[in-house]
Image (spheres, rainbow, N blue to C red):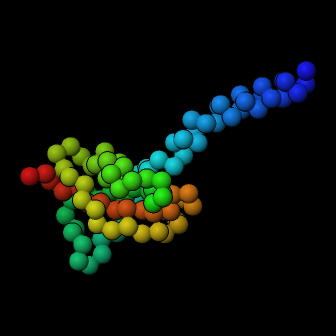
Amino acid sequence: MRVRAAIARALAIVAGISPIGCSALDPYATFPAAVLPGEPAAGARVAICYDTLVSSLDQVQAAAQQECAPNTQATPVRTDWYMQYCPLLLPARATFVCSASN
């Protein structure tokens, strides 16, 4: 009887954690990189933390587009891997410029 209770408790814990596990590796917004010489300076900048093995470039682009204002286009500027901005599981940071749509 104790074994069944322990198994039931373990299954409940796993079931409760699984939604978190699925979304833990989703791309999310973070602090954007500063403008470097030669990069476009006009427009708001947004950045997305993501895992290069799990997230597709389309997912990262879509996440950046959601952060940009309406009637603007998220254009990629650069990607870096500085751990102070993104955690170990999502080490890449893509910075985008939100420029006016034509």
Q: Quadrant of residue 75?
A: bottom left
Q: Residue at x 26, y 78 (%)?
A: 37
Location of residue 38 in the rendering, given as x and y in whole percent from the top left corner: 23, 77
**In the depicted structure, whether residue 49 falls above or below residue 16:** below
Looking at the image, which residue sits at the far right?
1
Looking at the image, which residue sits at the far top?
1
Quadrant assignment for the N terminus = top right
Residue 42 appearing in the image: yes
Is 59 on the left or on the right of 99, as rendered? Answer: right
Residue 32 appearing in the image: no
Counting labels gives 0
Question: In terms of depth relative to the viewer, which is nearer, 36 or 79?
Answer: 79
Q: Residue at x 28, y 66 (%)?
A: 77
Location of residue 54 in the rendering, given as x and y in whole percent from the top left corner: 48, 53
Location of residue 94 in the rendering, given as x and y in whole percent from the top left corner: 37, 62
Q: Residue at x 24, y 72 (%)?
A: 39
Is 41 on the left or on the right of 51, as rendered? Answer: left
Location of residue 27 in the rendering, given as x and y in whole percent from the top left corner: 44, 50
Looking at the image, which residue sits at the far left?
102
**In the depicted structure, whether residue 16 falls above or below residue 21:** above
Is 14 on the left or on the right of 21, as rendered? Answer: right
Q: Residue at x 51, y 49 (%)?
A: 25
